[in-house]
Image (cartoon, grey):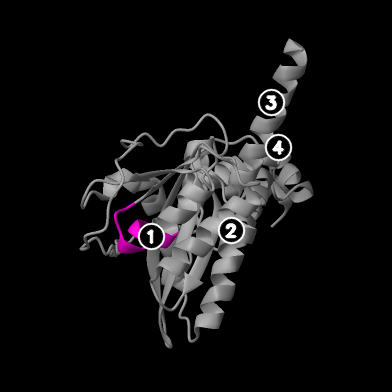
Amino acid sequence: MNISELCQFLKVSRAGYYRWRDDPVGKREQEILELDVIIRRLFAEHKERYGAERIRSCLKDQGVQVSVKRVAKRMKLMNLKAQARRKYKVTTDSKHTKPVSPNLLLQDFSAVMPNQKWVSDITYIRTDEGWLYLCVIIDLFSRAVIGWQISPRMTADLVNKSLMMALFRRGFPQGVIIHTDRGSQYCSKSFQDLIKKYGLISSMSGKGCCYDNAACESFFHSLKVELVYTLHYQTRRAANASLFEYIEAYYNHKRKHSTLNYMTPMQFESTMLLSTTTCLKKVG
């Protein structure tokens, strides 16, 4: 069968056949293949944590202009699904007679500058050696985790060390609102003494209201879904190393945050600081 007979049998033109022979993968097909490769790489790089919106933001950073709808379609065809959401139990020991502070945030989690509002909470991590408790302190301006500590016991020392880490990293600022729940650790004399010593302002959630500390709840949710639920920790040491990598290397520096216009916490702080400096120079 010659070329003419083959084209007639396949119902294609001779020109179309030669075009296919010389370029078997068309330009559009090549673009799709290249896009799929990048999407797969980004999905793997972020350890299957990113959905279409964040993948699209990463593509934009690399100069690839594509819609969220198209990214979602390609991910669906490649069966790339971000880690599923799960509910988790929150532990708060608020059955005590210690003094509590008024709620100064009133569910307003916005901040116009760093070190204006910090929030803190505690969650737990299961290991074969027993429970491990994690306390974090988050700056609401950038959602960066600026202080954290882990311990096999949920004590006042856990929150005290987290606060000292945040203070050291931020240069011991004064006048910061530090918002927590009413847990006995946060109501302890030692923690409240630190707040007074370094000129901070204590604020506490209403009794049994998880929405009063939604920013911390959101972080713990991401941590559990994207990391903890995907791993099995045999030792507390292994959990510690894993949490360090997630918080310091990934969350603060690589994970894009939807409330920050899909920038990372550190990227947002740098961008806003540069913008503020530029504005001050123009005014001056």
Q: Which residues are magenta?
A: 181-190
Cα separation between marks 1 and 3: 40 Å
- Is the residue marked by circle 3 packed among few (<14), some (14-19), or many (20+) residues within 10 Å? few
First in sequence, mark 2 or 3: give its number. 2
Q: Secondary structure at mark 2?
A: helix
Q: 175 above or below 5?
A: above
First in sequence, mark 1 or 4: give its number. 4
The residue to which callout 2 is attached is 165
First in sequence, mark 4 or 3: give its number. 4
Cα separation between marks 2 and 3: 27 Å
Cα separation between marks 1 and 4: 53 Å
The residue to which callout 1 is attached is 189
In reply to whether residue 26 is colored magenta, the answer given is: no
Cα separation between marks 2 and 1: 19 Å
State which mark lies toward you, 2 or 3: 2
Tell me the tag on residue 84.
Answer: none
Return the residue nearer the eye: 24 or 266.
Answer: 266
Can residue 215 be seen here? The reply is yes
Q: Secondary structure at mark 1?
A: helix
In reply to whether residue 186 is colored magenta, the answer given is: yes
Measuring from the top left, give residue 53's x and y in whole percent: 50, 42
State which mark lies toward you, 2 or 1: 1
